[in-house]
Image: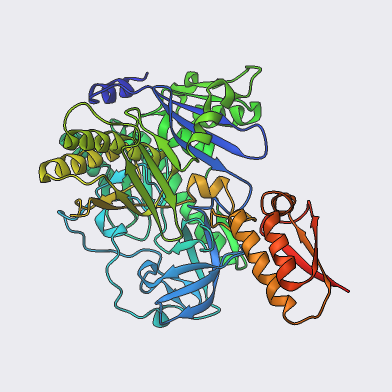
Amino acid sequence: MTEQGDVLTTNRVEYMYKELVVNAIGPEIRVAVLENGTLVEIYIERRDDSHITGNIYKGRIQRVLPGMQAAFVDIGLNQAAFIYVDDILNGQHQNGHTEDFFLTRQTEENGEEEDLPLESEDTESFPAAVERPAYKTPIEELIREGEEILVQVARSPIGTKGARLTTYISLPGRFLVLMPTVDHIGISRRIGDEQERMRLKELVESIRTTPYGYIVRTAGEGISAETIAQEMQFLDNLYEDIQQQYKSAPAPYLLHQELTVTLRSVRDLLAHEADKVTIDAPTVYKSVLSFVNKFMPRLKDSVLLYKGEDPIFDRYNLEVDIQRALRKKVWLKCGGYIVIENTEALVAIDVNTGRFVGKRNFEETILQTNLEAVKEIAYQVRLRNLGGIIIIDFIDMETKANQEKVYNALKESLRKDKAKSNVLAMSDLGLIQMTRKRVVRSLPKMLYEPCFYCDGEGMLLSRETLCNNIYREVVRQASDVGECRFQLKVHPVIAELLLGEKSNLITMLENQINCRIGIYPMPGYHMEQYEILLSK
């Protein structure tokens, strides 16, 4: 551990050994974050459009929607991206060119502290640049169709929703975040020492030469003025390069690409949170080692190459943990369980006592189950990267004091989660409503696709229901024809049922319509698929 790391460790209530495990052999890169050997986060990056958060593009306005105060923007993806009026800088776009790249805003010293728009792992004292004021100028007066625009991806495409864009550019470095569209200096909220916060703020103010905004990240605690100045110059040059590219590049065009998931994890976690990173691919190991030697040379011994014969995720037993994170039902140690359901608009989590009967009174049993469920829910929300609206249905408790215990326990358990969340008090029905910031797809949506059998419904018609539906359809068709023979082509399982347990149904049907019925099993058929043919 570095000297800086030792200082941070002493401020922790409990030491947490954190390790990054990188599986880069194969068609995708997977980065697992382990705390004391337990998988708590998993990041998956594929060679598609699913992970483009942070990328900067020169886009072209496709369509302006005054009724939605939003616009569709072509940034070169298969699916159009969109931008809301609140994410468009006033005065930025004139005659199709970007002439004013920064905007000075008044900031409130007591404003609510928000997460960085693109860096959810660092919470900052920076309300004005993130908390957008309600728009005053209509979007149709700010941008026009066919106009070119400099945008950054604030949220990657999720499902049928295109990428969400913003003109509030953010360029994260190791110690600083450059925010060229605002004139404000913020300090990471995780830096608690007031003298250090004041030193860093005065340092950045004295060094900067442009009206750009900067945020000092958690890793910047204790960093020298020379190091801060070097990174500031690097970020300024990077932004100037993006501006120059914007002037000459055709639209749409990728101007700046964020680091890979591996390098982002190393940059954001290794110095002040993770103790080591283990990588299985030699090429990725070399690139990470080169990155560390350049930006964090003292931590080069923390980067290890995995040389085991077994796949690295098998060595750490992570494949089993990932599969467990995809199940709807999660058992608790006490014998209760939670059920996690992902819907189109929200995530519903239900708590049940299951096999747990308790040892004392009923209220105590419910409270114990709910408190254990709280820890598991916070863990599963973080591991599965669930976002948006989350509704938790706890087991009903009679006393307000117990409801407060569960509510406070949930807020405390969520403190380990870097993604911003907002938790409302428990309702009289025992429901807790919360929101969690969503930037990329959740783990289930990343690894699963809708079932082609049930079209994502999660249910199939029962076999008995299918037999009854076939019965009614044959009767319906028989009323329009004379004496004939029916051929039923069905899935083999349904054929076996109609020829065995439900053979009386076919006998009754033949007597009712006065026709013979032949059953033909079709191995290639969907379970719910059947075909009724007539022959004389």
Can see residue 95? no
Residue in the foreground of this view, choosing between 80 and 38: 38
Can see residue 482? yes
Residue in the foreground of this view, choosing between 349 and 295: 349
When asked about the image quadrant of residue 403, the answer is: top left
Where does the image place residue 511, in percent across and percent down from the top left?
Answer: 73, 68
**Residue at the image point whose x is 35% and y is 69% from the top:** 86
**Residue at the image point whose x is 24% and y is 21% from the top:** 10
Residue in the foreground of this view, choosing between 213 and 409: 409
Image: 48 above or below 404: below
For the image shown, how many numbered marks are present on the structure? 0
Where does the image place residue 418, in percent across and percent down from the top left?
Answer: 34, 41
Image: 73 above or below 346: below
When asked about the image quadrant of residue 480, the answer is: bottom right
* Image quadrant occupied by the N terminus: top left
**Residue at the image point whose x is 36% and y is 63% from the top:** 102
For residue 359, side relative to residue 303 (left or right): left
Image: 264 above or below 127: above
